[in-house]
């Protein structure tokens, strides 16, 4: 590089520019983060406690009522679903011949029979992720608004 001062100068110049560009990005990123933090601190200083969660930021899960489990449908195999679909198709074809009054009573009766036959299945609550608490939607977990 000794014999080519021009190229060296260009290389150094480019390096400096890249470094400057990088630092600008970093500085602006930090600046935004700091500004956000200041804005949040200011907001929290003047904010009043959230009335919905009483300043806690979290509310007891109203989906599982803090039991962390909810009743859900029993897992079914693909074959079962296919069979049921085929049966429904058959029933639908037959029902066209039958009067409309009977059609209304049909599905409700069969549904209640199928739910009573299957044992209750419980799964983890999807709303709170088995923590029993949900983040307050009013204050987004800050406890203040
Ligand atoms: Zn829950
Ligand atoms: Zn709240």
Image: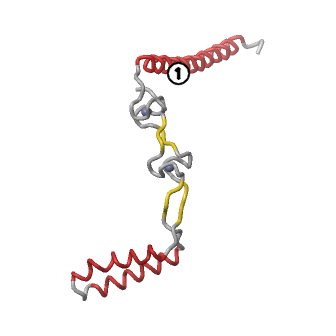
Residue 31 picture location, percent across and down? 52, 17
Q: Residues within 10 Å of mark 1 (few under 14, many from 20)?
A: few
Q: Is residue 62 above or below residue 34?
A: below
- Name the residue rendered at 31%, 87% in the picture: 94
Residue that protrudes farthest toward the right in the picture: 2
Q: Is residue 52 above or below residue 128?
A: above
Side of 3 relative to 42 (left or right): right
- Name the residue rendered at 37%, 81% in the picture: 89
Q: Is residue 66 above or below residue 3?
A: below
Q: Nearer the viewer, residue 43 or 119?
A: 119
- Quadrant of the drawing holding the C terminus: top left
Residue 105 picture location, percent across and down? 28, 79
Q: Nearer the viewer, residue 23 or 57?
A: 57
Q: The residue tagged with tag 1: helix, strand or loop?
A: helix
User: Label 1 belongs to which residue?
Assistant: 33
Residue 102 picture location, percent across and down? 25, 83
- Name the residue rendered at 53%, 21% in the picture: 33
Q: Nearer the viewer, residue 26 or 81?
A: 81
């Amino acid at each position: 590089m000794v014999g080519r001062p021009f190229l060296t100068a260009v290389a150094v110049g480019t390096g400096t520019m890249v470094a400057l560009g990088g630092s600008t990005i970093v500085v602006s990123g930090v600046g935004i983060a700091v500004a956000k933090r200041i804005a949040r601190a200011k907001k929290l200083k003047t904010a009043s406690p959230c009335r919905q969660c009483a300043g806690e930021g979290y509310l007891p899960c109203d989906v599982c009522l803090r039991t962390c489990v909810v009743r859900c449908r029993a897992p079914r195999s693909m074959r079962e679903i296919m069979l049921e679909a085929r049966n429904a198709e058959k029933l639908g074809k037959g029902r066209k011949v039958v009067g409309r009054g009977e059609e209304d009573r049909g599905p409700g009766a069969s549904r209640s029979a199928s739910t009573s036959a299957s044992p209750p299945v419980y799964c983890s609550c999807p709303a709170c992720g088995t923590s029993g608490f949900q983040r307050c939607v009013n204050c987004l977990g800050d406890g203040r608004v």
